[in-house]
Image (cartoon, grey):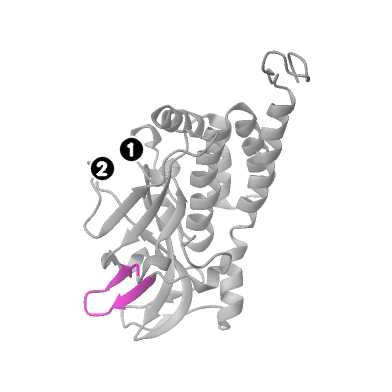
Amino acid sequence: MRALTFETVKFTMGLPLVRRAIQEQVKNTKNFFSRSLVIGEVLSTADMATGVKCGTIYWLYGGVITNLGRPRHAANSFPPMSGKLQEQKYMGMFAMTERGHGSNARGIQTEATLDLSAQEFVIHTLCEDAQKMYIGNATHGNYAVFAQLTIGGRSQGPHCFIVPVRDESGSLYPGVTVIDMMHKEGLHGVDNGILIFVKVRIPRDNLLDKFGSVGPDGQYHSPIKNKDARFNAMLAALTPARLAVMFQALGAMKHLGTSDVTSPPGSSYGPNI
């Protein structure tokens, strides 16, 4: 079921209407928001699993890449913009939720520590509570991971990083562990998982740096000096995704409202509800 859903997602995201909406997302044109919400509702009415996976790739992952990163990040790391969507084995995932932080996104414990001499960030899961959980597209995804940006022992707060999880053959990179959380009731085409990082190294340029960047000298720069305001600006990029979830639920309710539910023989509700 998961393999079928994955192929359906690739087909769906290659459709002209959906592809145009993705291009609008990258260019931040005025039609993106309304068009994408309608697409999410329609997809979820047709097949909820496809809608959920498209939402993970399109709104969540695509949203952070385009809203928190630079054009080069979208060109290199957002599969629908590569022009080779049908050749993609792995699409985007959005890894923020951790076992221990609950709704306190500011309190995530995964760390991204700058190694100045190597010009790299070291992504590390500090403890069990820092494990990324319920990550959508975990068995078919790569990339966007939220972690505490740490430079010289000082945290600059949560930032988003492009973290490759698998190589071209599908093997996990050293230091990366993915645990399948198995099937979700009613969404057997959706894969959720747990992600654990043990000192995984990524290039310094893999920081999505629209609101905060780190230079070759290790100095941190941001157009928003207040750490709280900067964090709020980053989370604002997720607003379309939150609304998209609401529209997906609306689509699923419409589908349920037009479906027959067969009652067991002898039920007091009659043959159909």
State yes or no: residue 35 in magenta: no
Residue name at image x 38 percent, y 51 percent: 77
User: Are the two marked residues, 2 and 1, in contact with CB atoms closer than 8 angstroms?
Assistant: yes
Quadrant occupied by the C terminus: top right
Quadrant occupied by the N terminus: top left
Occupied quadrant, residue 47: top right
44 to the left or right of 150: right
Residue name at image x 55 percent, y 43 percent: 55
Question: Crowdedness of circle 2 by 10 Å Cα count: few (<14), some, many (20+)?
Answer: few
Tell me: residue 202, above or below residue 155.
Answer: above
Q: Main structural element of the magenta stretch: helix, strand or loop?
A: strand
The circle on residue 170 is 2
Assign a secondary structure to mark 1.
loop
Tell me: residue 55, above or below residue 229.
Answer: above
| Magenta part of the chain | 111-125
Instruction: Residue type at mark 1: give it.
Output: Lys
Give residue 117's position: percent from left, percent from top: 22, 79
Give residue 137's position: percent from left, percent from top: 43, 44
Q: Which residue matches tag 1?
A: 89
Nearest the viewer among 164 and 194 is 194
Question: Crowdedness of circle 1 by 10 Å Cα count: few (<14), some, many (20+)?
Answer: some
Tell me: residue 112, above or below residue 65.
Answer: below
Instruction: Residue type at mark 2: give it.
Output: Gly
Tell me: residue 79, above or below residue 154.
Answer: above
Occupied quadrant, residue 105: bottom right
Residue name at image x 44 percent, y 53 percent: 74
